[in-house]
Amino acid sequence: MFCNPHFVVYLHDAPTNPPLTFLPPLQPPPKVPRQVLRELEKAMPEDAMVSTDIGNSCSVSNGYLRFKTPRSYLAAMTFGNCGYAFPAAMGAKVACPDRPAVAYVGDGAWGK
């Protein structure tokens, strides 16, 4: 039977050790990127145009953002051009001034 040697020592020295304490869980638990994208989707108008930077923010958005209006998603895809989202959103706004433009900008480290 496997037993953690540090735990065995802790039990052996139990009378002299302080009691084990556990941290309470985070309130509320952190959301994963897919959940955040769904919440952002709910908050945006249906005709919003969205642009994303490269990396996980782009690849996760590719799979989870949904649009009802054509030509609403501007993504760098696999071209690897950093800093794409903000100028793409500006260009989209110039082209369609009556529609909101949103840029998901970041370092692409959306893990999970």
Image (tube, rainbow, N blue to C red):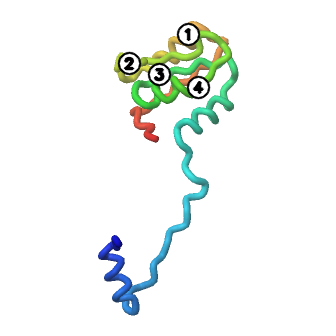
Disc with the residue nearer the chain's start (2 vs 3): 2
Q: Position of residue 38 (x, y in %)?
A: 62, 33
Q: Are marks 2 and 4 in contact (CB under 8 Å)?
A: no
Tell me which label, 3 or 4, sits earlier in the chain.
4
> Element under label 3?
helix
Say if mark 3 contacts mark 4, CB within 8 Å. Answer: no
Relative to 79, say whether 35 is above or below. Answer: below
Three-letter code, disc 1: Val
Dot 4 corresponds to which residue? 65
Residue that mark 3 sits on: 86
Query: Callout 3: few (<14), some (14-19), or many (20+) C-alpha neighbours within 10 Å?
Result: some
- Label located before the other in sequence (4 or 1): 4
Q: Amino acid at mark 4?
A: Leu
Going from N to C along the chain, the mark reached first, 1 or 2, is 2
Q: Read off the residue under disc 2.
A: 78
Tag 1 residue:
94
Q: Residue at x 42, y 20 (%)?
A: 84
Which residue type does callout 2 highlight? Thr
Mark 4 to mark 1 CA distance (whole Å): 23 Å
Question: Which of marks 1 and 3 precedes in the sequence?
Answer: 3
Marks 3 and 1 sit apart, C-alpha to C-alpha, by 13 Å
- The residue at 46%/21% (across/down) is 85
- In the rendered structure, the answer to whether residue 18 lies left or right of residue 94 reads left
Disc 2 crowd rating (10 Å Cα; few below 14, some 14-19, many 20+) is: few
